[in-house]
Amino acid sequence: MTPARRDTLFWLAQRTSAAVLALCLLVHLAVIIYAVRSGLTAAEILGRTRGNAPLAAFYGVFVIAVSVHAPLGLRAILSEWTLWRSRSQTWAMAALAVLLFGLGMRAVWAVVQ
């Protein structure tokens, strides 16, 4: 794959994940506002999330979008602000993506388990 094609795919993934994140964030904020206005306690919220597969799927998509978006954005910033443009940068960002995915899915699992 040529560097130009790779950069184009990274750009597309960055923008697509941003769109998904925007939608997820709006839904997440709406849920928070509903919970606060309804006076739900943390225990009541967790009671509603236990075993909720649609909620797990939604937040799973949220985690995937973050895992794609953040490392690509950081990669772009590092490429512009530093001289670090080697293959090690790509591997470091891939490791960050895996870390974000793992931690995010662990949080999702904790809430819906």
Image (tube, rainbow, N blue to C red):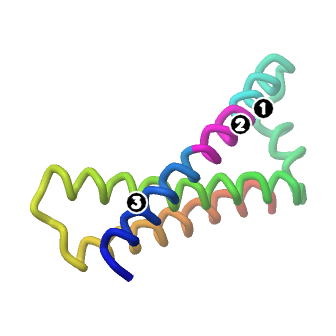
Specify which label sits upstream in the sequence, 2 or 3. Answer: 2
Camera-nearest residue between 94 and 38 = 94
Name the residue at 79% across, 59% down.
57
- Of the two numbered discs 1 and 3 in the rendering, the one whose residue sits closer to the viewer: 3
Vertical comparison of 38 with 57: above or below: above
Spot occupied by residue 69 in the image (x, y as percentages of width and height):
48, 54
The residue to which callout 2 is attached is 28
Is residue 41 within the magenta segment? no
Residue type at the position of mark 3: Pro
Residue type at the position of mark 1: Val
Spot occupied by residue 36 in the image (x, y as percentages of width and height):
76, 21
Specify which label sits upstream in the sequence, 1 or 3. Answer: 1
Name the residue at 51% across, 49% down.
15
Dot 3 alpha-carbon crowd within 10 angstroms: few under 14, some 14 to 19, many 20 or more: many
Location of the N terminus by quadrant is bottom left
Assign a secondary structure to mark 1. helix
The residue to which callout 3 is attached is 71
Task: Quote the CA–CA distance across marks 1 and 3.
Answer: 27 Å
The residue to which callout 1 is attached is 31
The answer to whether the residues at label 1 and label 2 have Cβ atoms under 8 Å apart is: yes
Task: Quote the CA–CA distance across marks 1 and 2.
Answer: 5 Å
Task: Quote the CA–CA distance across marks 2 and 3.
Answer: 22 Å
Vertical comparison of 31 with 94: above or below: above
Spot occupied by residue 30 in the image (x, y as percentages of width and height):
76, 28
Is residue 20 within the magenta segment? yes
The residues colored magenta run 19-27
Dot 1 alpha-carbon crowd within 10 angstroms: few under 14, some 14 to 19, many 20 or more: few
